[in-house]
Image (cartoon, rainbow, N blue to C red):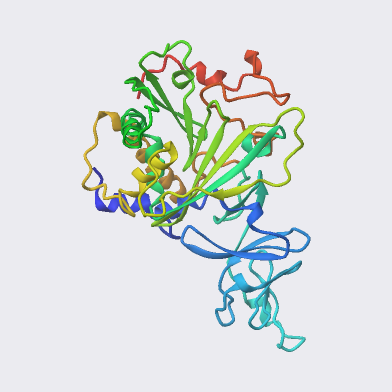
Amino acid sequence: MLTAEMNRRLTQTQQRTPGGELLRRYWWPVAVAGQLGPESVIGVRLLGEDLALYRTESGRLGLVSERCAHRGASLVYGIPEEEGLRCCYHGWRYDASGQCNDTPGEPADSTFKERICIAGYPVQELGGLIFAYLGPQPAPLLPRWDLLVRDDLKREIGITHLPINWLHAAENTMDPIHLEFLHTRYMNYVMKKMGRPPAARPRHHLDMAFDVWEFGIMKRRLLEGDDPETSDEWLVGHPLIFPNTLALGGERGPRFEYRVPVDDTHLIVYHYFTALRGPDEAPQEGVPFYEVPAKREDGTYVVDTVLGQDMMAWATQGAIADRTAERLGTTDRGIILFRKILEEQMQKVARGEDPMGVIRDPARNTPMLQVPRERQAYFTHTGGMVDSPEDDPLAYFRSKRDLAPT
């Protein structure tokens, strides 16, 4: 169990809190690109801050504090111009850094505007998502993860809003054993109640391991019936990209789950699905997006899908889980490891250091960052499976096969 103070440290997202300052060292999705057309503005909330995200007619992006410094009107109703976002109330305009650059009605020679500034943050569009960085300057590089930049993929994005703290989802990733019950026994129980055949084959975990790597933690599992010499789930596993992005492989195509802390008690999940584009398929015109509801119209949670079961388990712990009352067992060592790393990274930030996974070297980020995943999820740019060791991005993790479980 945790003390109440440690639970607060790990779950806070606001500025000037240990957890919030750590989270501000990373880029986060704030919208799907298709949600923001030319010459438009939408309101977004990230890490406890209400913001106005805008795109000019030429496509230039900006992200500033929602409230105008003049009289507090919402800039979500502002006018996007090439020089910045203009308030609808009295016309004050702010550039992408938040600096006021026009105050209509003031004398022509007035320097008043030079002393007015609101928060403004860097934003970039990549892979159909718009990312924002709310931390101190200079900003690190936006990670060019493989699925965001490859030119041979089809993409679509599901969006779920949940009334929970971000840590619920992160700790779920560090909890392999729930596969045996939530996604197997419970799944089959739900199928039976719905008059359907079993959907999952029960298998017991023979072993599990967690390997800390450059960008997070690799979770590996060995299930009954799997060969430890060939099982990708044991030799490779799938990572939590620190602090809260899940990368998965699978027969239907690799994907990301971006779990974005809106504030202390709200989370947005961007389910980033991909599949190989066929040789005769034209490149996508934009990335389609849609809602992935956690609940049905009657208010009950969706529990006949793996995604739905996870989100039910996260949400029913409450807005912020009471970790002072939990009782952890031996299968919870991944959760214990993750909390330890969180505390270590918060201490690094407090010392003025970059935390885990922050990228500043352009050579490290070019042409892309490859993510190891289980179940042969990698393909070459020509569309074929990777078949030579020197081209195999999983090789490093296969070399870890003999690591003792932590």
Q: Is residue 28 visible?
A: no
Instruction: Residue 220 in the image: state x and y as whole percent.
Output: 42, 24
Question: Based on the displayed image, in which of its 4 quarters is residue 389 positioned?
Answer: top right
Q: Residue at x 38, y 38 (%)?
A: 172
Q: Quadrant of the C terminus?
A: top left
Q: Please state if 209 lies on the left or on the right of 329 as rendered.
A: right
Q: Is residue 400 above or below residue 191?
A: above
Residue under the image location 63 percent in, 77 percent down: 115
Q: Would you say residue 56 is visible in this rendering?
A: yes
Q: Is residue 2 above or below residue 70?
A: above
Q: Position of residue 215 (x, y in %)?
A: 52, 35
Quarter-of-image position of residue 233: top left
Tell me the quarter of the picture where residue 43 sits.
bottom right
User: Is residue 253 left or right of 22 when viewed as pictured?
Assistant: right
Give whichever of 189, 312 is nearer the camera. 189
Residue 342 image position (x, y, % from top left)? 40, 43
Using residue 50 as the reference point, say whether residue 299 is left or right of it: left
Image quadrant occupied by the N terminus: top left
Q: Residue at x 71, y 26 (%)?
A: 381
> Residue 83: x, y in percent?
75, 68
